Amino acid sequence: MKILDIYNVLDFEPIKAKGSYIWDKNGNKYLDFYGGHAVISIGHSHPVWVEKLIQQINTLPFYSNAVVKQIEQDYAQKLGDVSGYESYEFFACNSGAEAIENALKLASFNTGKSKVLAFNNAFHGRTSGAVAVSGYKQNISEFNNNHNVVFADINDTETTVEIIQKDDLAAVIIEGIQGVGGIIVPDDDFFKAISTACKTTETPLILDEVQSGFGRTGNFFAHQQSGIIPDIICMAKGMGNGFPVGGIIVSPDIKYKKGQLGSTFGGNHMAMAAGLAVLEVMQRDNLINNVKEIGNHLIKKLKKLPKIKEVRGRGLMIAIEFEADNISELRNNLLFVQRLITGHAGTNTIRLLPPLNITKTEADVAYAAIYNAINSVMI
Ligand SMILES: Cc1ncc(COP(=O)(O)O)c(C=O)c1O
């Protein structure tokens, strides 16, 4: 049997990883400034993460939600402490899209409405509801095409508030910082205006922190920068450092009934062990401070690069948009010559999403690699 040929795959096979580095089968070493789409938060094969997973697999790797799971309760407690959302409740699932689906469903159960306000250029995943609230039309099939969604532009406060004030929405959904869309940062005032309009109309505000959460931007969740308090927050990616896990946290104002949501694998023992390791290391090593410090340092340097249009982002969620329309040659040079792994957005932007515990030296090595690649292929 073959694998469904559905992804654009790089000609590159990693076989080993440790910390911020990856090795291919020929023994070449790469600095990983992408973390498999922002997934690697505390570094590849972090010893605390490895130890916790081994311990868990040797005791109880899995049981479903039909039983008491102390480890999930411990996880929720710790997540409340670290995120500052102690009074919220945690529902576990297995991926980002699933978190979005559950958030939208819960909001709709609460309001009894179906219409959702989402934002152009957003990416929330590929399942039916998630794809419907995304700004990408190419992966919407006819089957997924019947959702009731209206779109506005990020930072278009007037239109956005006008739509919310019509008071006919099941939810508003927005990314903390748009990731796949090219690291587009909503203004603090825009977030505040949405939050106020949602509170006035009792419209649930859903924050998609799947990519921008877990310390990535220098706050635990990106929206915390603007001081707003959403009703439901979606998470995944950095949450498990590579172990598949997702979840939502829900305000006490959101009502629910038993059976409205569910998942066979959600909150399983292995996922919660991985998640606990991430939170423990984040707290122990003060990774949010590291993100702020190294992120500021790196962004400042990147802004001096030649041939660039703009550097966007916060913390270690960074985009570099180039003057050229197509940077495929630059991306190849970065990977195969400089041995720096980066992501992309569109055809002229690279995305940097390194582990949260990178050092200043690693940031400088990445900067030098990008500088050298620009000088090799663009000048
Ligand atoms: C902001 C955001 N939301 C949701 C998702 C979907 O997550 P998953 O691929 O785990 O379903 C992604 C994935 O890139 C994302 O970036």
Image: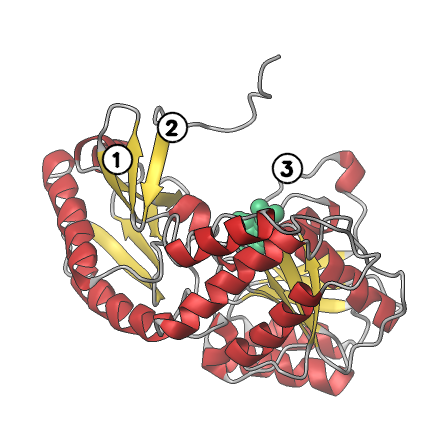
- Asked whether the residues under the numbered discs 1 and 2 touch, taking CB atoms below 8 Å apart as contact, a structural biologist would say yes
Where is residue 325? Give x, y as percent: 31, 40
Q: Quadrant of residue 85?
A: bottom right
Lateral position of residue 31 relative to residue 166, left or right: left
Q: Quadrant of residue 311?
A: bottom left
Q: Nearer the viewer, residue 365 or 272?
A: 272
Give the residue pinned by disc 3. 139
Whole-angstrom CA distance, mark 2 to mark 3, is 21 Å
Q: Nearer the viewer, residue 35 or 79?
A: 79
Q: Is residue 102 visible?
A: yes
Whole-angstrom CA distance, mark 1 to mark 2, is 10 Å
Image quadrant holding the C terminus, namely: top left
Badge 3 marks a residue whose secondary structure is loop
Q: Earlier in the sequence, mark 1 or mark 2?
A: 2
Q: Is residue 135 visible?
A: no
What is the three-letter code of the residue carrying label 1? Answer: Leu
Whole-angstrom CA distance, mark 3 to mark 1, is 28 Å
In this rendering, is residue 98 above or below 256? above
Q: Residue at x 68, y 39 (%)?
A: 140
Q: Nearer the viewer, residue 140 or 224?
A: 224
Q: Can you tell which of label 2 and label 3 is closer to the viewer? A: 2
Where is residue 234? Give x, y as percent: 62, 63
Badge 2 marks a residue whose secondary structure is loop
Give the residue pinned by disc 2. 10
- Asked whether the residues under the numbered discs 2 and 3 touch, taking CB atoms below 8 Å apart as contact, a structural biologist would say no
Q: Nearer the viewer, residue 279 or 323?
A: 279
Where is residue 175? Give x, y as percent: 55, 63
Q: Residue 335, which numbered label?
A: 1
Q: Residue furthest front?
A: 59
In this rendering, is residue 201 above or below 267? below
